[in-house]
Amino acid sequence: MNADSYVAIAFWILAIGMVLAAYAVVALPRIIHSALALVLFFFQIAGLYVLLRAEFIAAVQVIIYVGAVTVLFLFAIMLTNRSYAPDSNPANRQWIAAGVVSLGLLGTLLATLGRQTWPTGGQVPANATVLLGQLMLGPFILPFEIAAILLLVAMVGAIVIARES
Amino acid sequence: MITLQHFLVLSAVIFSIGLYGALAKRNVVAVLMCIELMFNAVNITLVAFARYLPATAGNPYGPLTGQVFALFIIAVAAAEAAVALAIILAVYRTRRSVNVEDVNLLQS
C-alpha cells in the first residue's frame, strides 16, 4: 500500500466519524451528551488538519477548541439547566422548515460542487509553520493586531456582561 | 485518491447539519454548539484550499493564505463563544430560562 491509500483510509474513517459526531450534537436528547459529541468532533477535525499537512492548525484546534471552548460550553450547561434531563435538548416548532432549508442548502452546494472543476498541483511547503509565522507577523500584521484587540475586548465584555450587577 | 472535492463535500454536509441545528434547537447552548459546527466546516474548506490549490500569480502571499484565514476564524470564534456564553448567563439570571422562545423582550 502506498501513502495515498493510507490517506484515503484515514480520510474515510475521519469523515464518517465527523458526520456521525455532528449528527449526534444535533440529535442527542441530553445536552451534556451533545457537548461531549462536540469534543469528539473537534478532535476528528484536528486529525483532518494533519491529513491536510496543517500541523500548526491541528495543534491550535486541540488547544483552543478541545481545551477552551469545550470547557466554556460545559460551564454554561452546568450553570444554566439540569444538564442530564432527558428533554434538555429539544427541537423547536420550526424543525420541519429548518430541515427543508438545510437540505436545500446541501443540495445547492452539492450541485454547485459537482459542476466545478478545480486546478490541481498545489502543495504545502515543508516548513509551513515557519512560513505561517512569517505571514502572520509580516503581511498580515494588521489583522493579527486587530484580532488581539478583539480578544481583549471580548474578554472584558464577557466579564462585564456575566457579572452580577 | 482523495481530492479537494472530497473535503468540500464533507464540509458542505457538516455545514448543513450545523445549520439545521442552529435553526431547529430550542436550547440556546445547543444553538451555539451548532454555530461552532458551522465555523469548523468553513475552516475545513479553507485549509483544504491551502493544501490543494496551486499558488497563482495574483496572490503574493503564497500557498498558506487559507491557513492564515483559518487561524483568524478560530480567534474570532473563541471571542464569539466567550461573549455569547456570558450573554446566556445574563439572560438566564433574569428570565430563568435558556429556551430561545422565552427570550422575547423585543416582541410587542
Image (cartoon, coloured by chain):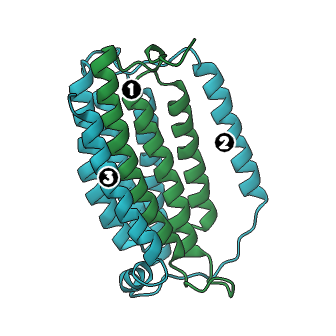
Chain colours: A cyan, B green
The answer to whether one can see residue A5 in this image is: no
Q: Is the residue A115 above or below the residue A69 in the image?
A: below
**Quick one: A78 or B18, which is closer to the camera?**
A78
| Chain ID, mark 1 | A
What residue is disc 3 on? Answer: A65
Q: CA distance from mark 2 to mark 3?
A: 25 Å
The percent coordinates of residue B76 (x first, y second) are 42, 55
The percent coordinates of residue B102 (x first, y second) are 44, 14
Q: Are marks 3 and 1 on the same chain?
A: yes
Quarter of the image with the N terminus of chain A is: bottom left
Q: CA distance from mark 1 to mark 2?
A: 22 Å
Question: What residue appears at the point 28 percent right and 44 percent down from the top-left corner?
Answer: A70
In the rendered structure, which amino acid carries the disc numbered 1? Leu
Q: Nearer the viewer, mark 3 or mark 1?
A: 3
**For residue B26, what is the image quadrant?**
top left
Mark 1 is surrounded, within 10 Å at the Cα level, by few (under 14), some (14 to 19) or many (20 or more) other residues, namely: some
The percent coordinates of residue A5 (x first, y second) are 48, 70
The percent coordinates of residue A62 (x first, y second) are 29, 58
Q: Along the polypeptide, which appears first: circle 3 or circle 1?
A: 1
Of the numbered discs in the image, which one, if any, rests on residue A28?
1
Q: Is the residue A47 above or below the residue A93 in the image?
A: below
Q: Along the polypeptide, which appears first: circle 1 or circle 2?
A: 1
Q: Along the polypeptide, which appears first: circle 2 or circle 3?
A: 3
Question: What residue appears at the point 60 percent right and 49 percent down from the top-left corner?
Answer: B12
What residue is disc 2 on? Answer: A106
Q: Helix or strand or loop: what does disc 2 sit on?
A: helix
Question: What residue appears at the point 40 percent right and 46 percent down from the top-left corner?
Answer: B80
A151 relative position to B102: left or right: left
| Chain ID, mark 3 | A
Quarter of the image with the C terminus of chain A is: top left
Q: Helix or strand or loop: what does disc 3 sit on?
A: helix
